[in-house]
Amino acid sequence: MKTNEFAGALKAFSELATAPQAAELRAAASFFEAGKVETLAARVKKLQPAYGAPALLKDALQAILSGFKFSGATKQATAMTPVIQFLSVGADLLTIDEFISRITAPPPLPVSRKKTKPPEVADQVLAEALADDLKQSILDKLEFGEVVKRLKIAKQVNTPTLALTARLFLGNEKQYDGRKDAIDDILKRQRADAREHARGQALKRIGV
């Protein structure tokens, strides 16, 4: 049964109903008559749950369904079933206008399930340990390089911790925007200290 056919049936049956039920049947008829002509099942699938169909409307439609069944109009009765099932949910609390307003409301926006990643913070203990490792190994190129390799692995040392490590090692308060700048400054210090140490050793050898 199509929505326009169902609307026509509701108007016809409203002539036999009491005044309050007739008003609700006519309102329901106007709803099914409006919009795209489609099957009742297709229309019901588009509706939002209202949890509280008007009691008079439910009773009237149930009576119509029974009439179809007893008269052998099984096709029409089957077509009405999705409507009856939709109306059977919840208590009878709404007026016909409230009910139609709710079932035709826009669907709620989907709730985002994406987890917000918490902001990264510096690990003070780790930064102090790494800065100490850098200071202890600054004249040993291989050992110093191993510490720097660890600093480059973001999963082991996050960016705030790397920046804090650089400040502790270099003794400055520089704010680093990225990882590369911090690593570059650390390597510059190591090269500068290595050159200064080599110069000192050379001067010792020549007795200066």
Image: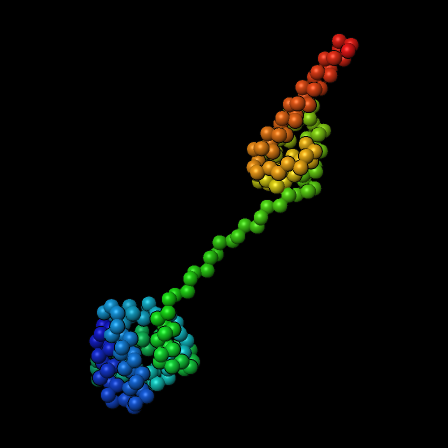
Quadrant of the image occupied by residue 37: bottom left
Note whether 49 is above or below 13 in the view shown.
Answer: above
Residue farthest to the right, as pictured: 207
Quarter the C terminus occupies: top right
Total label count? 0
Q: Position of residue 5 (x, y in %)?
A: 21, 76
Q: Position of residue 121 (x, y in %)?
A: 62, 45
| Residue drawn at the location 27% of the way across and 74% of the way down | 32
Note whether 19 is above or below 2 in the view shown.
Answer: below
Between 195 and 150, the residue placed more toward the observer is 195
Note whether 153 is above or below 4 in the view shown.
Answer: above
Q: Position of residue 56 (x, y in %)?
A: 35, 85
In screen coordinates, is 125 left or right of 62?
right
In screen coordinates, is 107 left or right of 41?
right
| Residue drawn at the location 35% of the way across and 80% of the way down | 96
Quarter the N terminus occupies: bottom left
Q: Position of residue 125 (x, y in %)?
A: 70, 42
Say if residue 184 shows up in the picture.
Answer: yes
Residue farthest to the top, as pictured: 206
Quadrant of the image occupied by residue 80: bottom left
Say if residue 157 shows up in the picture.
Answer: no
Between 41 and 75, the residue placed more toward the observer is 41
Residue farthest to the bottom, as pictured: 18
Quadrant of the image occupied by residue 88: bottom left
Note whether 133 is above or below 73 in the view shown.
Answer: above
| Residue drawn at the location 64% of the way across and 23% of the way down | 191
In screen coordinates, is 32 left or right of 113?
left
